Image: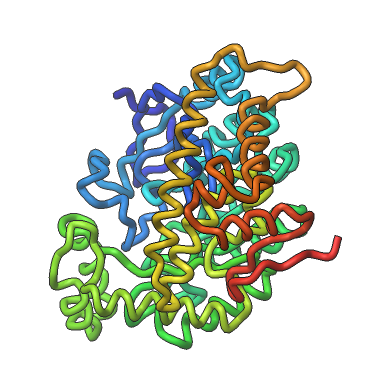
Amino acid sequence: MDAIPDSPCATTSHTVLEAKTGISRARLPEPFLVSLYRGLAPYRGCEHACAYCDGRAEKYFVEGQFDRDISVRMNLAERVAADVSSHALAREYGSICIGSGVTDVYQPLERELGIMRKVLGHLSETGLPLVILTKSDVILRDFDILSRFPRVLVIVTVTTVNDEDARLLEPGASSAAARLAVVRLAKERGFSSGVMAMPLCPGISDVDESFSALLDAASAAGADFVYPGGLTLRPGSQKDAFLSVIDARYPALRPLYDRLYRENRQSGMPVADVGRTFVKNLDRRVRERGLPQMIPHRVYRDLLCPPDAFFVLLCHMQSLYSLRGIDTRPLKAATDRFADSLAAERTALRRKRTIVADSDPFPITRILTERFVQRMAVSSGADSLAALLGNDRLAMLAANLQEKGAYFDYPSLQVMTESL
């Protein structure tokens, strides 16, 4: 790999990594970040240097020192432009997600190179919505381009609003105040925006005072949701790096971490009983504020076509009901049946390259949606949505959500209707 010349940053090493693809698509939307398409990140490794970052784990194979040796896909914008010009993103409506837990697309180097700005310029020509995830206020530079997309969801990660803790845990990232300003300004622009409150670190940012302050700040910024999550520590370089910070800055907490992560699970999850209790407690505290505890249906229903949005809703409902102690096995069975059917239909339509229409930019989406609506219109029989799901109540829910302005409210678990 060749070194990038004349980099002004003396503390990092930047090398060129060739991007072989620009945008990939899935058979089903990804529920966590509610997207059908995935954009490759311009960078591998991250100068934000977050102590807890999962990207430090060996499974991601980041060469060198994770926060010092940054690889750059200098040709990414050209790859994306080629995808757009070849109509690789045509025929199907669905959001494109750019962002990951391994690297931040708006890390400090982006100020110099501007790769994301070029990528967004090409993607804005597709007519597709965008989901973008960062913990940097550099994204504000590109709000002018984001305004060209039909719909945008800007997600910022905020783990704590305590400046001292943030300085120790995520020294290279924008301040919490700057990130929350991104949420406020995104909402003023007409974008959707919310907060990923993860990972919340035991004894530091998961305690009542710290998490309550974060929820207050997110609410004040106008966040559409706060999605909390706990810390995973994969055995190896990630766990070692994080515990070195604990030993140096929070030594009294070391016994807590030794107890929570004593099993050294490959997933990095803490011991099971503590993990379940922790997640349920976070869910309760977010709901008490009236905030959705994950990206809400009223946001992503416009980022995806109706059958894809319904699939994501079924996936989210499994988590929401499970957190409240409700048996979700029937729901999972229905989700699996619907997923198999939707994926098979989409695959078959993608193989029919003749499905084009000059007046319809997304013909596959139109056909999938028509079939979905037709199934809802059939009250019984093998062709009905109820038969496909094996569940009359879920079929009724789908029909209710087709009403204009209707959405499934996550805090109350009820269908609501916006005043239009």
Query: Which residue is located at x 32 percent, y 46 percent?
Result: 68
In the rendering, at what x and y percent does residue 348 appear?
49, 24
Question: Would residue 305 be visible to someone looking at this image?
Answer: no
As drawn, the residue found furthest toward the top would be 354
Counting from the top left corner in percent of width and height, residue 357 is at 71, 17
Name the quarter where the C terminus is drawn: bottom right
Q: Which of 211 and 301 is in front in this view?
A: 301
Residue 165, by quadrant, is bottom left
User: Looking at the picture, does residue 139 appear above or below residue 410?
Assistant: above
In screen coordinates, is 405 left or right of 310?
A: right
Residue name at image x 55 percent, y 17 percent: 82
Relative depth, front residue between 20 and 62: 20
Work out which residue is located at the far front of the displayed protein and give it.
381
Question: How far from the left and from the top, in percent, is residue 398?
Answer: 63, 55
Residue 204 screen position, x and y as percent: 37, 79
Look at 67% across and 69% down and name the residue there: 221
Q: Which residue is the extreme one toward the right? A: 420
- The structure residue drawn at horizontal position 43% and vertical position 24%, both measured from the top left corner, is 21
Q: Is residue 68 above or below residue 245?
A: above
Q: Is 161 in front, or is 13?
A: 161
